Amino acid sequence: MDLKNRFPHVFALSLLAPIFALTGCEPDVGECDPELAQRVVFANSPGQATNGLPAFAGQAMTQSSCSDGAFCHSPNANGALRFGVPAGLDFDVAVPCDLTVTEDCAERDITRLGENRDITYEWRSAILREVQTGQMPPGESGAGILADAVQWQDRDGADLPAIDSDEGQDILANWLACGAPVVEVTVEPDPTSDPGRRCEDRDGDIGLCVYRAPAIVEPPDPNWTDIWEEVIEPQCGLSCHGPGDPDFRVESALDLSTKDAAYAAMVGAEGAGEECSGTGTLIVAGDSANSILIDKLGEDPECGGPMPSAFRLMPQEFVDAIAEWIDAGALDD
């Protein structure tokens, strides 16, 4: 049996082990404080399905600094977004079961959580050393992507400490020492259950169930100005389809960097770029059902991957507002 082909992630890790061993003594992650390790924070990501999503602080810090479902240590990363990380060295511990968005938990996502949590714990000392020495997260080369990662806050609105701060490293070390516990399942809070509390009899196979926080931002009004200012510009125009890092305007043949450019590039414009060329019209005025844009905001679009990227789908209320604007004629106000 060819073990290299059957277990490529294990082979990649075995190659990396001598590199870590040669770079010096590994730090001790210390004793486990279970209460601190299960401190809950919430995603502050207006206009995205992750808005209000709970996670343990160390879990959230690892996500925003190491993978965020799209870059570096994520199995979904590729090309430049991988930043040289060997295949299999994945620390993507995103919450896979958001029962406020879907009724089912995708088995592939639960498997990913379990495998990545185990890898994260296995490499706990090396991870802490890389963070403490400032080697990780990557510096200037990854600054743009890190800036676009989901931001996290506690229930009082205080930001999650940065991973390069003393407090942030203490949170990370304790979380690793406790076995890298994870939130696996989340549900909407009810009147008797505050956000961040454990669910009763709802825990998953790998992690715990925690009540979600309510959405913190209302969807845009169904007009172009609100849609541009609250959705297109912050989620698409500042990076990916704009001058920020990463900049995919060439590959996608779609420039959304300004309000006027975005309107001209989508309303009545045919799909272009490497994945959507020849598949239809981005926005068909009066017909949202046949507009590529609406299809791309769903889980399984006909061309390319869902948008926004990084697997953070837009809440349905936001999609409905955009569809309402399109059906009303997609006017430029």
Image (tube, grey):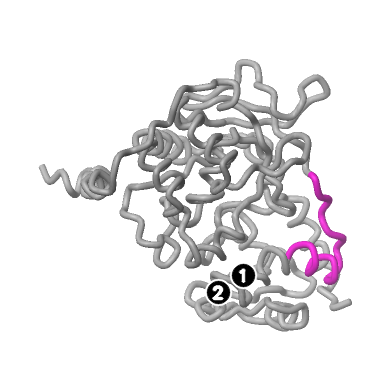
Secondary element at tag 2: loop
Q: Is residue 327 visible?
A: yes
Say if residue 12 shows up in the picture.
Answer: no
Quadrant in the rendering for residue 117? top left
Give the Cα separation between the discs numbered 2 and 1: 6 Å
* Residue 247 marker: 2
Quadrant of image for the N terminus? top left
267 or 197, which is in the foreground?
Answer: 197
Q: Is tag 2's residue or tag 1's residue first in the polypeptide sequence?
A: 1
- Residue span colored magenta: 216-231
Task: Say what amino acid the circle numbered 2 marks.
Answer: Asp
Q: Please name the residue shown 58% across and 70% down the image.
A: 240
Q: Is residue 185 left or right of residue 206?
A: right
Residue 239's disc is 1
Q: Does residue 230 show up magenta in the picture? A: yes
> Quick one: which residue is furthest to the top in this view?
201
Disc 1 residue type (three-letter): Ser
Left or right of 274? Residue 103 is right
Image quarter of the C terminus: bottom right
Few, some or many residues within 10 Å of mark 2 (<14, 14–19, 20+)? some
Report the front residue among 16 and 168.
Answer: 168
Q: Nearer the viewer, residue 44 or 276?
A: 44
Task: Say whether marks 2 and 1 touch (CB < 8 Å).
Answer: yes
x and y, in percent, of residue 218 in the image: 83, 51
Identified at 73% across, 54% down, the residue is 47
- Helix, strand or loop at label 1? It is loop
Measuring from the top left, give residue 46's x and y in whole percent. 74, 52
**Which residue is at the far left?**
1
